[in-house]
Amino acid sequence: MKRLASIALATAITLLLQGCAGWQSALDPKGPAASELAWLIWFFTGLCAVVWALVMIALAVPLTMRSRLHIDPLVLDAGADNRKLRAVMIAVGLTAVILVGLTLLSFFANRTLAAIGSDAALTIRVTGHQWWWEVRYEDATPSRILTTANEIHIPAGEPVRLLLTSTDVIHSFWVPSLSGKLDLVPGRMNVLDIKADKPGVYRGQCAEFCGAQHANMGTFIIAEPRAKFDAWWNDQLQPAAAPTSDEAKAGENLFLKRPCVMCHKIGGTPAGGTVAPDLTHVASRQTLAAGTLAMSRGNLAAWIADPQGVKPGSHMPVVDLSGDELNAIVAYLEGLK
Amino acid sequence: MRPVVALLLSASLALAACQREERDTRPQSALGSGEQPIPVTTLEPGGQRPSPADNKAASFEANAFHLSEGKRLFGWFNCSGCHANGGGGMGPALMDEKWIYGSSMESIHATIRDGRPNGMPSFRDKIPDDQIWELAAFVRSLSGNAPSSAAPSRNDDMMVHPSENRMPDAATLGKSP
């Protein structure tokens, strides 16, 4: 029975640790900042575990040792008292050294983190909204400034500077595989530098409770080779693809006539709302509604038909559309690659 | 016996604090958006309700959630472009006691949905009906017609002074951090 229990425990721990690998884990670092932090996590945990074990042993030994029960309190043993005092002083001294050492370690790790983006060529402004991320690529040429949502493409192997702010409440930007978390505070600009060593997709998550759909406020960092990233940027700067089929044309018309146009922007059309995600190239993204649904025609329709069922409390309202109208709008959006 | 009664009493008082305002994020419009058979052919004299009255008027009016949603939409849909946070500009002021087309929720709803002569555009089909009701409730609250426990507060940036945590610190000799 005991053996079975220990096997079950070992299996459970292995399964739990499995959750620490993959595209969203501080223990599976994919960039210099995350590596630095992961090293700190392991070193702190290891050292503290050793200290904890030593303290436990020091407590257990006198408890299990057979003590001399008949100590005469009037007999003084100066030698033993001195030995005890020395042991306590050594323990206090060691504690001080360890604490100061750990403080210095974390101080130097912070210096390394701060130096990552000192020569960043790319600046991205990330604005937190309830419950999605607005992503704006800054450029000296105004026509190359690009606004998108929820998915942040970056060139792999290059440092990128993120300017973080918020329009409503405090959010927190956390991509565990790439860096630590940093808050997005309304009225304040925070700077976070990230770097992905290799191409890949890294998931991020809002890490500061920000309301009903805090859990469904995901983001993706998509690191690509420089050439692919530049091509992506150029593609995204183009106005939206013109609808080709009759259904999609009807969808564009409906989009402009119905409530969609009040909040969303589609480049190249009169739709110019800025309070909701930019939909100019919505179909080129991998997910919908800040990482809640995978991008597909069915999910697009589900999201538009009943956003309050998918993400209760989100600011996307239920719009009264007939089945044909819904199909037409979905056909149009699906073509916005 | 006495301590038990005291405990029960305080527990029931504490539980009363758990009551939370209902947040109806998916209020179903009984008649469908923009399809209310309200004939708005002539101007209503001030204060007279167009009929039939929608039950949304009553349920949204004193509901903090719907009022604050109305406030958010007021900003999002650029009502301030003409009404300037209720103070008035190109459009009439909304925070005073004058109502050109009636002060009832139904009248304000009709104003937003169908528009009014000399500038107020129609938002029929452009704003879901529930959101028009939320906007109407907020517009009514601007002139103090909503309970203060439910009415949304003024934005920080509209205050005479910056909020306390943004005031320059005396210790830093007036330089804000």
Image: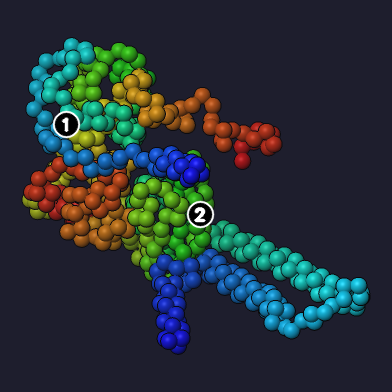
Q: What amino acid is labelled 2 in the image? A: Leu
* Most foreground residue, B110 or A188: B110
Around disc 2, counting alpha carbons within 10 Å, would you say few (fewer than 14), some (14 to 19), or many (20 or more)?
some
Task: Give percent across and percent down for residue A190.
Answer: 52, 49
Around disc 1, counting alpha carbons within 10 Å, would you say few (fewer than 14), some (14 to 19), or many (20 or more)?
many
Task: Give percent across and percent down for residue B31.
Answer: 11, 35
Q: Is residue A113 visible?
A: yes
Q: Which mark is residue B124?
A: 1
Task: Give percent across and percent down for residue B131.
Answer: 24, 35
Chain name for mark 1? B
Dot 2 lies on which element? Answer: strand
Label 1, label 2: how many angstroms apart (C-alpha)?
42 Å
Quadrant of the snapshot with the C terminus of chain B: top right
* Most foreground residue, A80 or B153: A80
Q: Residue at x 35, y 51 (%)?
A: A213
Image quadrant assignment for residue B124 = top left
Q: Which mark is residue A92?
A: none
Give left or right: position of A73 versus A24.
right
Report the residue marked by disc 2: A182
Give left or right: position of A201 versus B10.
left
Dot 1 lies on which element? Answer: loop
Q: What amino acid is labelled 1 in the image? A: Arg
